[in-house]
Image (tube, grey):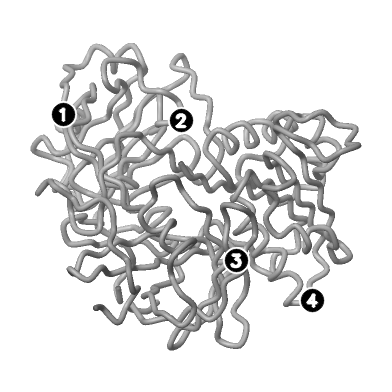
Amino acid sequence: MTVWQQARLVERLRETDSAVTLVFEPEEWSGHLAGQHADIRLTADDGYQAVRSYSLAGPVEEGRVVFTVQRVLGGEVSTYLCDDLPVGAYVEVRGPVGGWFVWRGTDTRPVMLLAGGSGIVPLQAMVRQRRALGSRVPFRLLYSVRTPEDVIYADELARPEGGVDVAVRYTREAPPGARRAPRRLGLVDLNTHGWPAEFEPMCFVCGPNGFVEAAANMLITLGHDRHRIKTERFG
Amino acid sequence: MSALTPGFRGGRRTVSDRVPPGQYLTEGFPVLSAGPTPVVDTGEWSFTVVNEVGERVSWDWAAFSRLPHESPTVDIHCVTRWSKLDTTWRGVSVDTLLAEVATAADFAVVHSVDGYTANVPLQDLTDGQAWVVTGYEGAPLAAEHGGPARFLVPHLYFWKSAKWVSGITLHDEDQPGFWERAGYHDYGDPWLEQRYQSGW
């Protein structure tokens, strides 16, 4: 673990109307596990500081760490990061944090990822870690999102690598021609796109609390062992 | 002009000296759990205290309900940086539970039905500092907040206040719990910002 260090914003990528990917170059980064997060600290001219934790969106590449930040209405840190922080400016970072909601490449169980909204971020970090390792562990990602415009990492998800199945389900508005009417994720979706409980997959569920609560309960209903269900909730 | 984060002004300056450093006030009650919310039937629930030599005392729901109850109003502080002031709970003081067992232990581990654990020095659980609570703001404690019964030790970060509690074990040696083994601080004093394991 490390202390606060300065990190320069080197790139900003728009993901959706409300989500931005930020690429930082910290002074040094010891590495992290897929699913971990880190603290970002902002300092105002009068010395006021604000700190929030954000999920790391993928493994370290060339010393750069990547976050995807969802703008929270009235959120003093997320709105600044999404709208105002200029490329070339510095924030402070500290991390990584969290040793529980992580996927390690050494675990060979099939992986089931259930994402709600911006809960996709730490789960896509696991997919990217799998890719970086050249792992062949079978992954299935089921992503519940409001509308097609809200899909984070849309291009990447549209072309998953071998061994990673991706299904996106819409809750409010589906793309033209979709056969499934927009609705919340249900047992049918998990049955169709999830691993059977007999495969004993490791399940990671991340999203707003209502989503996580519902999705984790559905996994239990389908017979998954609660000790193989890890959750991360926000809101 | 700060070299850092140009143009950042910030929104919510904390206005209360009851809010520890690095925390912000919330009006909501966020839910943070490591796994699915367990369904705990009060007909099957019990709370057990086991001392350092293995002696145990248990209460089922009915017996627990007959113990003297208190209604503490306290401030709570989550390591994820929200704090909530003046929360009112209803439950049994840990002093009442520990009065039934002889112990010279220095440490306690709080256990949940789902296997979650949190370690706390025993001296932090006595003298009116901790409760096992079954009610929140005048209503039975909701399952997602730890119902039917959770721990409440408000002077430490809130992960120490384990949800869905099933008992306390007493020990001569400190034994890191669930989050403490995953990188969080052994003690967790919000006023000292003891968020993560030493080094931070």
Circle 4 packing at 10 Å, graded few (<14), some (14-19), many (20+), is few
Of the pair A72 and A130, the residue shown nearer to us:
A72
Instruction: List the residue tagged with mark 3.
Output: A57
Q: In 3D space, how far apart are the residues under numbered discs 1 and 3 (Cα atoms)?
A: 40 Å
Amino acid at pointer 4: Gly
Question: Disc 4, disc 3: CB below 8 Å?
Answer: no
Indicate the secondary structure of the residue bearing disc 1.
strand
**Quarter of the rendering occupied by the N terminus of chain A:** bottom left
Please state the chain letter of the residue tagged with numbered disc 2 in the rendered image: B
Give the image location of residue A27, x and y in percent.
Answer: 43, 88
Instruction: List the residue tagged with mark 1.
Output: B73
Question: Disc 2, disc 4: CB below 8 Å?
Answer: no
B44 w.r.t. B2: above or below: above
Q: In 3D space, how far apart are the residues under numbered discs 3 and 2 (Cα atoms)?
A: 28 Å
Circle 3 packing at 10 Å, graded few (<14), some (14-19), many (20+), is many
Instruction: List the residue tagged with mark 4.
Output: A134
Please state the chain letter of the residue tagged with numbered disc 1 in the rendered image: B
Mark closer to the observer (3, 2): 3
Mark closer to the observer (4, 3): 3
**Residue found 77% across the figure and 64% down from its top:** A156
**Residue found 24% across the figure and 41% down from its top:** B76
Question: Disc 1, disc 4: CB below 8 Å?
Answer: no
B165 w.r.t. A81: above or below: above
Please state the chain letter of the residue tagged with numbered disc 4 in the rendered image: A
Do marks 2 and 4 share a chain? Answer: no
Circle 2 packing at 10 Å, graded few (<14), some (14-19), many (20+), is some
Instruction: List the residue tagged with mark 2.
Output: B144
